Amino acid sequence: MLEDWLSFGHAVAEIVERRGVSQGAAQRALREALASGDIQSRRAPFEQQGAAAVLLGPWEQIRPEQWREASIDLTDDLVDVYVPDFRVWLGKSKSMPKKRGRPPKLDWEGEIKRQVFALLEYYGAPNPIDPERGTQAAIEKDIKDELQRDRITVAESTVREHVSGFISEWKAKKAEKAEN
């Protein structure tokens, strides 16, 4: 059933909210749970057609060893996690420590996320066929250039971590709209 599955991006957002950790830490924890077999997952190819995400093939199960070989959520496929497994894992997983240290100097979940979503709405999901706009790196470069114009220096890995999560979240929202 449709409600038994949750997009990877939404699962990460729930971990961030419930555990108070960064998006990257939540992604790592979820990938580890998927690689261990604690949570089932599935994927399906899709294509962005205007405002709608259209599935290009059937859903297929992702085996735990596939998660150990690659971060499947970073592919062009939609990736879902099985809700009953996710809820059990989230309920019994030991609390992740609160993020410590200096507060972030940028509002990643506000203005920067809106900028990434605007780029994705305009250009569509990263597509390797499009040499101009076909990569996550192009979006990362746009964000990094914008920050540098404001004289803000950010590590490339930090931009990559956030943009990756935003792309996953955007794809999940598009898939939800397509299913409704």
Image (spheres, rainbow, N blue to C red):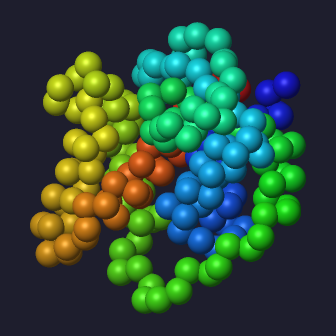
Q: Is residue 65 left or right of residue 37?
A: left
Q: How many numbered marks, from 0 up?
A: 0
Q: Quadrant of residue 146?
A: bottom left
Q: Quadrant of residue 43?
A: top right
Residue 12 seen from this side: no
| Residue at position x 42%, y 48% in the image | 164
- From this view, report whether residue 99 is shown above or below residue 64: below
- From this view, report whether residue 102 is shown above or below residue 160: below
Looking at the image, the residue that sits furthest to the top is 57
| Residue at position x 26%, y 30% in the image | 134
| Residue at position x 23%, y 23% in the image | 130
Considering the image in quadrants, where does the N terminus appear?
top right
| Residue at position x 20%, y 51% in the image | 141
Indicate the position of residue 109 as horizontal and vertical percent values. Answer: 47, 64
Indicate the position of residue 112 as horizontal and vertical percent values. Answer: 36, 61
Q: Depth check: 28 or 132 in front?
A: 28
Considering the image in quadrants, where does the C terminus appear?
top right
Q: Depth check: 39 or 127 in front?
A: 39
Residue 15 seen from this side: yes
Q: Depth check: 4 or 52 in front?
A: 4
Indicate the position of residue 42 as horizontal and vertical percent values. Answer: 67, 28
- From this view, report whether residue 173 is shown above or below residue 97: above
Q: Is residue 122 left or right of residue 40?
A: left
